[in-house]
Image (cartoon, grey):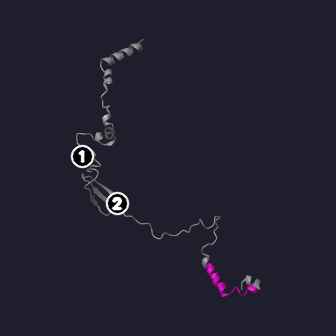
Amino acid sequence: MTMFAASVPHLAGRLNSPSLVAASARASAVAQTRNVSSSPYGRTHVWKHRQRQLPKPFVPQFPQRVIRADGSTFTHYTTSPRSVIRLTRDTTNNPLWNASKWMAESEEEDVVTGRLGRFNRRFDGLGGHGQDVDWMSEATGEELAKAVEEAEKKLGE
């Protein structure tokens, strides 16, 4: 008999009852997890750390040699198990990537494509293509020499 049962004689018979023994067995099984958190915020923010169900997947990376249409090759790593891939259409022979190759060879690429080509197409009929540049010829030859002499005279005075 325990000390508690000896001090309280009317509970002595109840402490050894089968229901109390079963309750204490359940309590010992439940005692493995805490019902009360030591955190001042309660148990709502405390997470149980569980192991992952499956390990993270391993993604295989295979080296792959790519042979382009012009014959150049490079190696890159991919999940495809094919070791060699031959391209028939790539950036070297596609008209969307190389517009100058499919246009007249006499035209320069910048004139036709890109920002300069877009600018020229947009403002094509507005003029300004060197039509009124006669004022530039005034500063050449004799007139330039006269202007230099006049400037030297004024500086010399």
> Looking at the picture, which amino acid does disc 2 mark?
Thr
Q: Quarter of the image containing the N terminus? A: bottom right
Name the residue carrying label 2: 78
Q: Residue at x 36, y 15 (%)?
A: 149
Q: Quadrant of the C terminus?
A: top left
Residue that badge 1 annotates:
102
Q: Quadrant of residue 140?
A: top left
Q: Secondary structure at mark 2?
A: strand
Mark 1 falls on what kind of element? helix
**Mark closer to the chain start, 2 or 1:** 2
Q: Residue at x 65, y 87 (%)?
A: 18
Looking at the picture, tell me which residue is in the foreground, 1 or 115.
115
Instruction: Pinpoint residue 17: horizontal percent, then vertical percent.
Output: 68, 87
> In this rendering, is residue 113 above or below 2?
above
Write the start and end of the magenta stretch as one range: 10-28
Which residue corresponds to the image point at 32% horizontal and 17% vertical from the top-left?
Answer: 143
Q: How many marks?
A: 2
Amino acid tagged 1: Trp
Of residues 139 and 46, the one drawn nearer to the viewer in this rendering:
139
